[in-house]
Amino acid sequence: MTTPLRVLVVDDSALMRKLIPQMLAGDPGIEVVGTAMDGDFCLRKIEDLKPNVITLDLEMPGMNGIDTLKEIMRRHPLPVIVVSSHSTEGAAVTLKALGLGAFDFVTKPKDVSAHMTESAHELIAKIKAAAQCKVRPRPVGGLVVRPEKIRAKVTQPPSRVVAIGISTGGPQALEYLLPQLPADFPGALLIVQHMPESFTNMFARRLDELCGLRVKEAQSGDLLEAGRVLICPGNHHLKAKRLPLADVVALSEEEPVNGHRPSADVLFRSVAEEFRGQSVGVLMTGMGDDGAEGLGAVKKAGGMTIAQSEESCVVFGMPKVAIERGYAIRVVGLEVMASTLQALCGRSEGKKDGNAGKSARAGQ
């Protein structure tokens, strides 16, 4: 018989210390071995209870969640799932926690009675995935360089349109990848990151501060431009559209696909249909199979398809499915993803016909 995963619940709220064990009680593969009301108790109980996974509230008196996370990563590197509020402040501190090595996060249900089952399924899935991952602590402190943005007087059409689908482990991966791309990167990047709508704007702003590219949360009508990154807002789908005067994105609130809104499949299929051979589909770290069939559509349309390598993924779920189905033309490690995208989106193809901007319109 398989030994249940041992979970330690850390939250200053007595209600949450009762509610989270109730949410996990329905799965025989998980055992809540203890609870702690603050960071000091958490660190002591880790030594006594030897948990496999920790759920961690960030807003606690005394030693707060961020300081507790730093100490966990320093003393007992374990997978930590942040339990976050939906507020702007909650989003900011949650993204900071992910940058410090937290595995993933779940948001506290606004209406416990209405969303208890849904929240329980999400938390159980993430605990099981976290238990299988390799913990990679991130450096604490250090100088954050805020690069200057290149603000072109005339915006340039992209050489290629790069669509990225990413989920668990995504914030860390994107914070690593995007700063390695130059501000004058010739491609346009469209990103579906599985994340609640209250978090995506904050996440886009954080990425914009970290890299030379221009990053923003997408709005319908935003132009596809070289050196621009558009992050799909939570609870919406993102599609690329070709119009007579410009290439733009459009948002929709159509039904979830693969249980997700946004869905990487929706983005990939639109990019494949609109840009065909000038599309690049990239499927990165994440649980489940969202994006696999869409990546297949990009490949069928003549575009390039890339899956992140197993050893560089936090969770090798989404890329693995695409690879097994034969949809990934290349398998690339995170450490060389930026150089791979630069090589694919270079201006050389566009220069052959004397107009780099026309390369994204090839294949019409």
Image: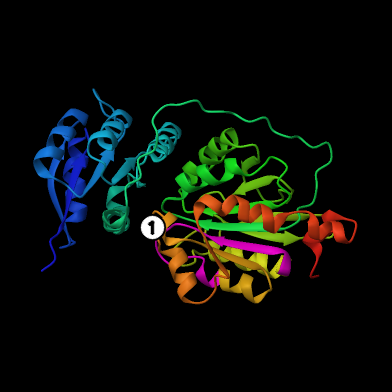
Q: Quadrant of the N terminus?
A: bottom left
123 and 324: which is toward the camera: 324
For residue 209, side relative to residue 344 (left or right): left
What percent of the width, then of the height, locates residue 112? Answer: 28, 48
From the viewer's perspective, is residue 108 above or below residue 352? above
Q: Is residue 184 visible?
A: yes
**Range of the magenta residues?**
277-294
Q: Quarter-wise, where is residue 82 in the image? A: top left
Quadrant position of the C terminus in the picture: bottom right
Q: Is residue 245 visible?
A: no
Answer above or below: position of 37 versus 329: above
Residue 206 higher or lower than 295, as above or below: above
Q: Residue 231, how many percent across, how many down? A: 58, 48
Return the residue at label 1.
315
* Horizontal side, residue 52 vs residue 268: left or right: left
Q: Nearer the viewer, residue 24 or 168?
A: 168
